[in-house]
Image (cartoon, helix red, strand yellow):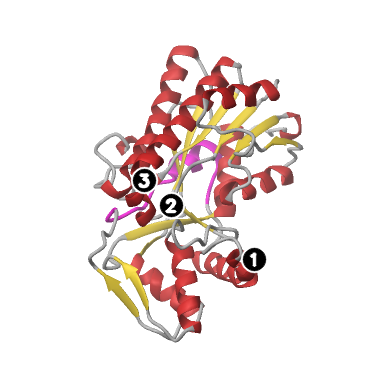
Amino acid sequence: MQPFDWSKKKIIVTGGAGFLGSHLVAHLNEVGADEIVVPRSKSYDLRDKDAVVQLYADNPNTDMVIHLAATVGGIGANRENPGTYFFDNIMMGTLLLEHARRNNVPKFVGIGTVCSYPKITPIPFQEDNLWNGFPEETNAPYGIAKRAMLMQSMAYRDEFGFNAIHVLPTNLYGPGDNFDHKSSHVIPAMIRKMVEADENGENVTLFGDGSPTREFLYVKDAVRGIALAAAHYDKRDPVNLGSGKEISIKALAELIKELVNFSGDIIWDTSYPNGQPRRNVDSTRAKAEFGFEATVTFREGLKEVIDWYLANRQQLAATHS
């Protein structure tokens, strides 16, 4: 691959103050980018056309948009807010991509979700299977909204020659993750529940029966993959980013129990849905196209997340119930 000079690029990173975004901005700084714009929601509501128009007007000569901003959450949050999750995500993607095209931005990097894959998909998930069915019901509105952004990027490339790519990271985890009880994903939710239950001498109740499997990608591996794709990938087809490792939710719970020294019992509440039966993506396209491979082992990554949470509990408690 040819070297990529990040120092000469002006980059808008939506969601750049969030979990994934903050790690991406740090990584881009490390590889030489020094003109990064992070639009904040109080100044730019990316669901609103006028705000998106203003964002581009305020940042002429933008070389690249990396769209990470999203309204996301776990199974419970998806079930409670399907309309919000659909509207917020489809509007942000649609407006940002359309006005990037109108402003002749040279490259748009859309970040999708593994939730866009059909509920029943051959393992490992290959990008060509993305259109072969409906997503798992509990997160279908979010998954379909992100799938629509991919369709838009492909259509814009075909009609306008617009350089938009679509990257599909699998489930992410890492330091700085969301530990809010109402909207956190499975790893931070389990860590917090077990730490708090252990202090109170209680057991922990988890949703479903623990049988589904998931693949997890450490956030610092993910941002390295996103940056490589942004620099070197220029095709219409989506591209997966994954670790290649699959683990059941039950095995995940037992591993976290061990790492946080939780002494209570884990109770499975089967009145709640399991979610998608399996998630494991094929990342061979990412390796072939821009040399991406995950490097952080799952156990190593989990230890870092747990250490980060324990060090930041008091600060998090001030902002999350």
Q: Residue furthest top?
A: 159
- Name the residue tied to disc 3: 115
Residue 59: x and y in percent read: 69, 25
Q: Is residue 146 left or right of residue 318?
A: left
Residue drawn where x is 60% and y is 70% of the image: 313
Front tag of 3 and 2:
2
Q: Which mark is residue 315?
A: 1
- Name the residue tied to disc 2: 73
Quick check: 230 above or below 268?
above
Quick check: 206 above or below 23?
below
Residue 257: x and y in percent read: 44, 77
Q: Is residue 145 left or right of residue 306?
A: left
Looking at the picture, tell me which residue is in the foreground, 131 or 70: 70
Which comes before the other along the chain, label 3 or label 1?
3
Front tag of 1 and 2:
1
Q: CA distance from mark 3 to mark 2?
A: 11 Å
